Amino acid sequence: MIWALAAAVFAIVAAGVYLALARDLLRCVIGVSLIGSAANLVMFAAGRVGVAAPPVIAAGETVLVDAANPLTQALVLTAIVIGFALTCFSLVLVLALSSRAGIADSERLRLAEPPPGADGKPVEDEAR
Amino acid sequence: MAGVLVATPLLVPLATALVALLAAEHPRLQRALSLAGAFALLACALALLVAVEASGTARVAFGDWPAPFGIEFAADRLGAGMALITALMGAATLVFQLSDADPAPPSPTLLPLVHFLLAGVGGAFVTADLFNLYVWFEVMLIAALGLLAHGASARQLDATLKYFVLNVLGTMLLLMSIAYLYGITGHLNFTALESAAQAIDPLRLLPFVAALAAAFLIKAGAFPLYAWLPASYHTLPAPLAALFAALLTKVGVYAVLRLLGDLFTVSPPALYEALGWIAVATMLLGVLGAAWHWDIRRILAFHIISQIGYMLLGIALASRDGNAGAIFYILHHIIVKANLFLIAAIVFRLAGSYDLRRTGGLYRLRPWLGVLFLVPALSLVGLPPLSGFWAKLIVLREAMLQDQWLWAAAALLVGFLTLYSMMKIWFEAFWKRHPDPDWQPPAQVRLAPAYAATVALAALTVAIGLWPEPLVQFAQQAAASLERVP
């Protein structure tokens, strides 16, 4: 089970990095949120997987034996919620940016950082 | 009593943010509440530092869960000192916001977001739980994104996107490494992690500690992933730029210090060696990036990166004096860097541009403003008798004592190049004539709050420079309390 998860994390991170490196903004943010999902899976796997026993510490014991650790599952819930909010924000951001700038190509989006002028010096910023 | 105080660096700004949101329809009331909240935070942080100085590290775990099961908040000297400087920056920038010098455009959500940001920063400084630290990084990130996108011009959204992608990748790496470390040690609580790490082979921990350090380094704006910082900071209105410049990267540095100087001091020396070279590269590339630019804000943004290198160098030296140097450097640099951004906004208001090619003549108009600028600028360079001199002295002395001559030489060279950038600003904005012969400074400007904030911060810089002993002692005690008590 843990190896299946490891393979899944590997595949998702690979796909996420591939997408995040794309010049298209939408692909980029989807790639980033895929990597977030992989991080959640790692967190999930850190608490032992593959057992369905309820996480109850038996009388007289002090540690949890033979059950998945519920703490990491709680942590994953937190991480999922945060990741979801960030994904929503990034999608709105990409929409707003591409509609204002008229392009969605990260290579050509140099609004905040204009490329150097013809003489190699920084161009004078017209915005301010 | 101390228990409640520990949580105030996050509870007070959170409460202020919520109250300010409720008062969103009454701008004047909202502004008054937000200022009151900022000064309440300052008072609480001061009380916390006094309590910690008097009786050592203060701890609280909500719900009274015993350690290591509860989510613990703890303030040692380092945490309390950082919380105080955070509160100070919050108050200074909110006062500055009242002036006419490039303030953030008013909006019902602006001040609540600023306080959410302060809550994230404060929470990161007083938490004693690794996952909780991740949560505060996320709070900071989302509040920062909200503030960056606040103006909603295409330029600002472009900057927001660049800030977003690299920072979120850092956060993902942070979350993954925390998961691995929890898988290995079974703990998230700082104290428990520290003792668990003693029993584990350092080489087994190394990849995950290194990954976590790398995540913090992205947040700190260190080489090689610092491009998000100079791509975004200059699109912010002045008070926000000052707040970001003062606090956000320093939370990353603080986290690196906590990780490598406190929790996992068992890490192999190669990790510190690598951090040292990263620090040198950060310093050099930051200062060289600044040399090319002509926009004051871009120059200052690149100098944040270069100064982060000095702090990391202190941590990389992995000794009590090295850590003390890093702590002193962080505290001094927060004050100086915020002040430079704020004074740049006054220059912008009076001379009409942030671009040095279109400014000038300010020394004739406002000689005292020229002096006011020189205080933080020369302190950034590290000239005596200003605070930066002592910060650099402690770090450099320790580097030389450890025979790291190359690192020390790089640090000195970067200091020299910093002087070049600061003099460039001074000559171009103050000394030379204004390029527009018909230029007239604006007649009606409200700069009193701006001067109040900047003069107060400059006075602090001078005070630390003339009487460094208390702060040096504090930094050394803070570094000593990071060490493990057997």
Image (cartoon, rainbow, N blue to C red):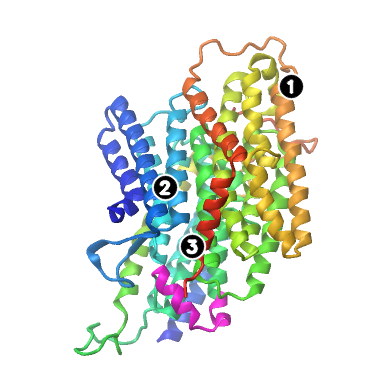
The image shows residue B361 at horizontal and vertical percentages of: 70, 17
Q: Is the magenta stretch mostly helix, strand or loop?
A: helix
Q: Residues within 10 Å of mark 2 (few under 14, many from 20)?
A: few
What whole-number distance in Å separates the C-alpha atoms at marks 3 and 1? 47 Å
In the rendered structure, find residue B431 and report the number of the disc placed on it. 1
Q: Which residue is drawn at 69% across and 50% down?
A: B393
In percent of the image, x 47 and y 39: which residue is there? B89
Q: What element carries label 3?
A: helix
- Tell me if residue B191 is in the magenta stretch: yes
Residue B318 x %, y % = 62, 66
Stretch of the chain drawn in magenta: B189-207
**Amino acid marked by disc 1:** Trp
Q: Looking at the image, which is closer to me, B306 or A4?
A: B306
Assess disc 1: are there few (<14), some (14-19) or many (≥20) residues with their C-alpha within 10 Å of its C-alpha.
some
In the picture, the disc for residue A92 is: 2
Same chain for mark 3 and mark 1? The answer is yes
Q: Do labels 2 and 3 share a chain?
A: no
Quote the CA–CA distance across marks 2 and 3.
45 Å
Chain hosting mark 3: B
User: Dot 1 falls on which chain?
Assistant: B
